[in-house]
Amino acid sequence: MSETPVRVPPSPVPDPSTLGFWQAAREGKLLLGRNLETGRLHYPPRPVCPFDDVGEVEYVPSSGRGTIYTFSVMRAKTPYAIAYVELEEGPRVMTNIVDCDLEALRIGQAVRLVFVDSEGGQPVPMFTPA
């Protein structure tokens, strides 16, 4: 099996509205936003629901399980896979698929959450085959 080479993601630049998300990532948790009035989930979590402007937003943890909705293998100097993962809770996440055989990736494949340290050390949520 040919595993993906290690590709270190750039460091995120948190702002006041994303500090809680990045703190949770340091604790190994992926947060989603949930509208308290409608119950709709969204990613990335943000203080205002992207679907409507009613209801406050709370942050809830994701199970970290999902499936590959679509993906593309980037044949760069260090090849990598970029993908949309559909979380079991519903939202889709743009991410990388890591620690895998790039040739074996398939749409609909089950994946699970992992965190990869960025250049500055901040863990970034990514996924690997389950």
Image: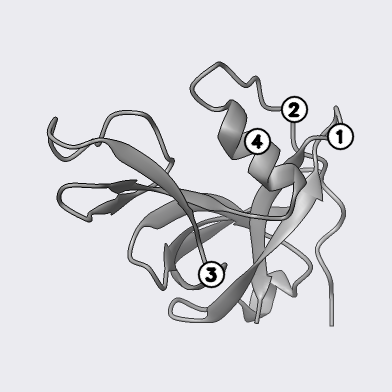
- Please report the residue visible at 59 percent of the width from the left and 75 percent of the height from the top: 111
* Quarter of the C terminus within the rendering: bottom right
Task: Measure the alpha-carbon separation of dots 4 and 1.
Answer: 11 Å
Return the residue nearer the eye: 8 or 86.
86
Q: Nearer the viewer, mark 3 or mark 2?
A: 3
The disc, 3 or 4, on the residue closer to the chain's N-terminal end is: 4
The disc, 3 or 2, on the residue closer to the chain's N-terminal end is: 2
Q: Disc 1 marks which amino acid?
A: Gly
Judged from the image, the secondary structure of the residue bearing numbered disc 4 is helix
Q: Disc 2, disc 1: CB below 8 Å?
A: yes
Residue receiving disc 1:
121
**Residue 122 picture location, percent across and down:** 79, 35
Label drawn at residue 63: 3
Task: Measure the alpha-carbon separation of dots 2 and 1.
Answer: 7 Å
**Residue 120 picture location, percent across and down:** 85, 27
Residue receiving disc 2:
11
Label drawn at residue 21: none
Residue receiving disc 4:
22
**Residue 20 picture location, percent across and down:** 58, 33
Q: Disc 4 marks which amino acid?
A: Trp
Q: Disc 2 marks which amino acid?
A: Ser
Above or below 6: residue 67: below
